[in-house]
Image (cartoon, rainbow, N blue to C red):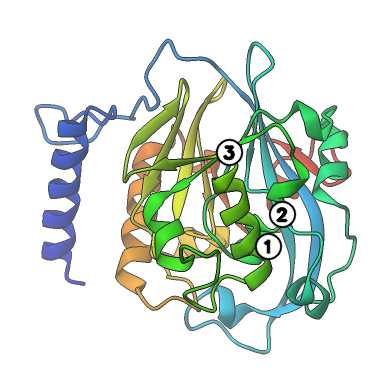
Amino acid sequence: MTDRFLTAAVLAQLAVLAGLGVGVSVSAAGQARPPATPAPGSPVFEVYAVRYATSPGLAASMLVAGADPSRKIDIPFMIWVLKGPHGRNVLVDAGSYHGSVFERWKLTDVLKPSAAIGKVGLAPGDITDVIITHIHWDHVNGVDLFPSARVWMQREEFTHYIDDEGKPKDQAITPDDAAMLAKLRKGGRVVFVDGDAKEIMPGVTVYTGGKHTFASQYVAVRSAAGTIVLASDNVYLYENLEKHLPSGSTDDKEADLRVQERVLRLASSPRLIIPGHDPAVFERFPKPGDGVARIE
Ligand SMILES: [Zn+2]
């Protein structure tokens, strides 16, 4: 991508975002000011990353394009908890707890996601909403652990991967997870989101454009520290952002890089962008500890 194209692309995207009223503003000099998404005045959430397992020794080249494959990283598997006012408790992704893929990965430090949220004082029945960023097993398999939650996902993500009978249309989703989501949909628990930059509840906006899967989404949430972006697997590691390198396992490197440019504009500060699988989340936000990072 040339610099000239990059500038044009960024300006075009800013214009689109400004048109959508999602809080990106451009000053007279053409410099983007810090965005205020979601809208000022909306509720403020406490935001936590909660580790539910670790995958030891993943090759760095899977996570960062061009990285040395002999460099191994112990990556955390996480869910993210948004504690809002009036008993609204939102999960971003639901982790995994069973099934053949789960067994095959030989994870360590495993906690059932429904138990892991106990570390932030919540029980499964307290979860009012689950936002699914994408249909990979480590993000979606635990959805059925939360009996009262509404389940938010992109309509195109669902219809691309799951047929009318609840069978997978693509091997990116496991048969068990496809059947489970189809059942929840039949039961009226799934709320479809149609596209980009949707404030699905006050203080929480979802964005698409990362092609980690067909219609993966990521989440911006208002907190006392400003707008936090939970990038999920649209940004695997801080290293992707800091070196502006795409994921090592994407088919669309340009989409990956455009997401990076966009989350940098959406978050109130770069440190409030939380990648999907970086162990350093728990070092940069060491409190309260024991596998829980309060993003602040
Ligand atoms: Zn993942």
Quadrant of the drawing holding the N terminus = bottom left
Q: Is residue 159 above or below residue 92?
A: below
* Residue 179 on image: x %, y %: 62, 62
Q: Which residue is mark 2?
A: 95
Q: Which residue is mark 1?
A: 138
Considering only order in the chain, which callout, 2 or 3, is on the residue closer to the N terminus? 2
Q: Is mark 1 within 8 Å of ligand 1?
A: yes
Are circles 1 and 2 on residues that touch, CB within 8 Å? yes
Q: Secondary structure at mark 2?
A: loop
Q: Position of residue 152 (x, y in %)?
A: 51, 41
The mark closer to the camera, 1 or 3, is 3
Nearest the eye: 126 or 210: 126
**Label 1 vs label 2: CA separation?**
5 Å
Mark 1 and mark 3: Cα distance apart in space: 20 Å
The answer to whether 282 is drawn above or below residue 243 in the figure is: above
Residue at coordinates 10% horizontally, 32% vertically from top-left?
Answer: 29
Q: Report whether 5 appears left or right of 128.
A: left
Circle on res. 165: none
Is residue 213 or residue 15 the one in the foreground?
A: 213
Residue 168 located left or right of residue 175 = left
Q: Is residue 227 left or right of residue 98?
A: left
Q: Residue at x 39, y 15 (%)?
A: 40
Three-letter amino acid code of the residue under disc 2: Gly
Q: Amino acid at mark 1?
A: Asp
Q: CA distance from mark 3 to mark 2?
A: 18 Å
Image quadrant where residue 87 sits:
top right
Q: Which residue is mark 3?
A: 189
